[in-house]
Image (cartoon, rainbow, N blue to C red):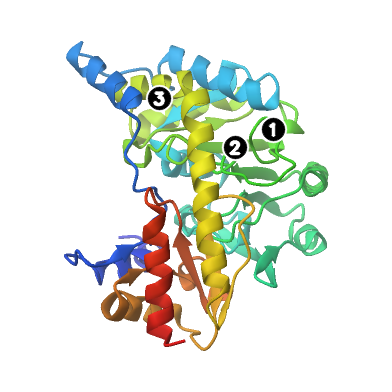
Amino acid sequence: MRQTVLDLEESRIREVANAGLGRSDVLAFWFGESDEVTPDVIRQAAIDSLQRGETFYSHNLGLPELRQAVADYMSGLHGHIGMDRIAITSGGVNALMLAFQSLVDAGDEVVAVTPVWPNLTAQPLVMGARLKCVSLKPINGQWVLDIDALKAAVTPATRVLVLNAPNNPTGWTLTRAEQQAILDHCRQTGTWILADEVYERLYYEADTVNGCAPSFLDLATPDDRLVVVHSFSKSFLMTGWRLGWLVMPPAMTQPVGKLIEFNTSCISVFTQRAGIAALQHTADITPRVVAHLQACRDTLVPLLQAVPGVRVAPAKGGMYAFFQLDGHPDTVATAKRLVTEAGLGLAPGEAFAPEAAGWLRWCFASKDLSRLSQGAERLRAWLNV
């Protein structure tokens, strides 16, 4: 067994969740998914596919009709994106791993903006990369990026810059001006940008364009050193389906198809049929999901702000409230205590970066808003304030 693999940290989120296994009284907000099931029209498309007997291998890059549907969907958001830039993947995690396998050799330098979902920093380590982190900074509960610090960290020696915006866990989102500055700088240094934009439709600011957050795809040319990761998980309530896609320069697509062959071979056809149905019904599904998530955010955040010792700001994007809890620097221990003593399941900040110690992530994607109120009351009662 490679030492690199042995040295990987286990998920701190799973560590906390394991403390609540088998307890029906726990209000669980630790994982990044809604408790609402996938819409019926999507599930029915998969059922129909199975009934037709579509149980065989498909193309490495995905069904042509799904690739075209994704290209059309992305073009509607960000200007023309050809099918020759699209690869269908077994979820966003697989898309990220394929991107790192495509771009990173052992010993390469990778810069990541943190706090961030731990897969984005673990995967380059799996590839043997040298990881350098640039931290967002919290100001009154809102995390912000020091662009000058990021530019100083990204040099001609940097192979890949990893960015997740809207960000999990902080809700931080890049502005258009920041994206342009980063793109210009990476063009100068020859650095690839790997942009995890899976939360782009979960965006709540007034400057939304076409119903999504600013994207590097709005600024870059097809041949720029840019790879964008997407997933059906969040905007279409499809976390368990494991279906995502990559947008990349056309010259990368066929080589990535080879990598897919050596990773997963292909994605099940019935899952891809579900993806096609999701895209066909985007106008019915995604705006409703986003409106409900904004209602969830606007329900939970004021409740948390009213708790003494809590510092939190409304997330600009994503599906999380990331809050600081005074007097509780070890939030792994705190999260475990909340499970056992309060029946409240949250994710510890240390899962996302060392600098997030003392912070907790609350996934507010709850079908029932009253669960959020109950959870906030349990936190207040546990703190005895």
Mark pair 1, 2: CA separation: 8 Å
Q: Is 208 in front, or is 355?
A: 208
Q: Is residue 133 above or below residue 124?
A: below
**Disc 1 and disc 2 in contact, CB within 8 angstroms:** yes
Residue 124 seen in this snapshot:
no
* Amino acid type of the residue tagged 2 in the rendering: Val
**Number of marks drawn:** 3
Q: Kindly state the secondary structure of the residue where label 1 is placed.
A: helix
Tag shown at residue 275: 3
Tag shown at residue 217: 1
* Amino acid type of the residue tagged 1 in the rendering: Leu
Task: Write down the residue under mark 2.
Answer: 228
Which quadrant does the N terminus fall into? bottom left
Residue 315, image quadrant: bottom right
Q: Is 176 in front, or is 265?
A: 176
Q: Earlier in the sequence, mark 1 or mark 2?
A: 1
